[in-house]
Amino acid sequence: MPTMGLDSIVYLLYEYWIDTTDEHIKEYPLIGGGPGLFILIMLSWLLFVTKLGSNFMRNRKPFVLREIMIAYNLSMDASHETQDYPRVTNGPIKPSKSCPKKLFTDIQIPLMGYLVVKQCPQTFVVEMFCFLNSSVHVIMYSYYLLSAFGPQIQSYLWWKRYITRLQLIQFALLIVYAFYCGIDNYDKYE
């Protein structure tokens, strides 16, 4: 069985990503080189979400940010924001252990975005990615905004259960689309 030498590992972790990056984006600091900076950012986020944030709030009273969260969710809805920030629906904020599904979906979009922009920076590919992600986020932030108004509106939020399904459909479409783009562009690296 062939073994990987240090040169092969360096190539896979750094040089491959430079060799396969589109010439138009090689100058961009986050996506022009290897994935090291991106991985560092994502691991820092993961550390904060799973450990540091919870430890920081362990012996503190929860923050009450109802009005701020209403304004935040409204602004996210209005701007069709494509980033996935922590959300609060109603009442005080108290960190809890993040479930694996939540962590997975919060890592999925930056990872897919990184790979799409790295490998297929054509305008249509990026537009499709942003369109799907923004559409799902408009629905999500609409739900978070409405639920922040309190229990009197809960009966109108029957569609909450469909948000997760929509996220899973978005995830599957993005994987299929990214896979298609990778196959479509494969010959340029041979």
Image: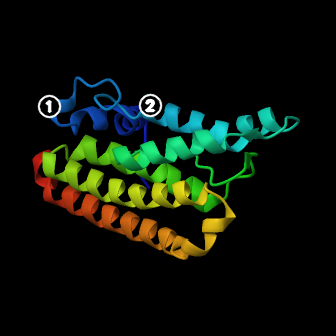
Image height check: is 18 above or below 103?
Answer: above
Mark pair 2, 1: CA separation: 20 Å
Dot 2 corresponds to which residue?
Answer: 36
Of circles 2 and 1, the one toward us is 1
Q: Residue at x 31, y 59 (%)?
A: 132
Image height check: is 116 above or below 144?
Answer: above
Q: Position of residue 157 (x, y in %)?
A: 55, 71
- Residue situated furthest left in the rendering: 188
Please say if the residues under marks 2 and 1 sit with CB atoms less than 8 Å apart: no
Helix, strand or loop for disc 2: helix
Q: Position of residue 22 (x, y in %)?
A: 17, 37
Q: Residues within 10 Å of mark 2 (few under 14, many from 20)?
A: few
Q: Is residue 17 visible?
A: yes
Quadrant where the N terminus sits is bottom left
- Residue situated furthest front in the rendering: 152
Q: Nearer the viewer, residue 126 or 141?
A: 141
The quadrant where residue 32 appears: top left
Q: Position of residue 28 (x, y in %)?
A: 27, 25
Q: Nearer the viewer, residue 128 or 139?
A: 139
Helix, strand or loop for disc 1: helix
* Kind of residue at disc 1: His
Q: Residue at x 36, y 40 (%)?
A: 12
Q: Earlier in the sequence, mark 2 or mark 1?
A: 1
The quadrant where residue 179 appears: bottom left
Q: Nearer the viewer, residue 132 or 69?
A: 69
Q: Residue at x 55, y 73 (%)?
A: 156
* Kind of residue at disc 2: Gly
In the visual, does 174 lie left or right of 69?
left
Dot 1 corresponds to which residue?
Answer: 24
Q: Position of residue 100 (x, y in %)?
A: 63, 59
The quadrant where residue 43 appears: top right
Q: Is residue 3 visible?
A: no
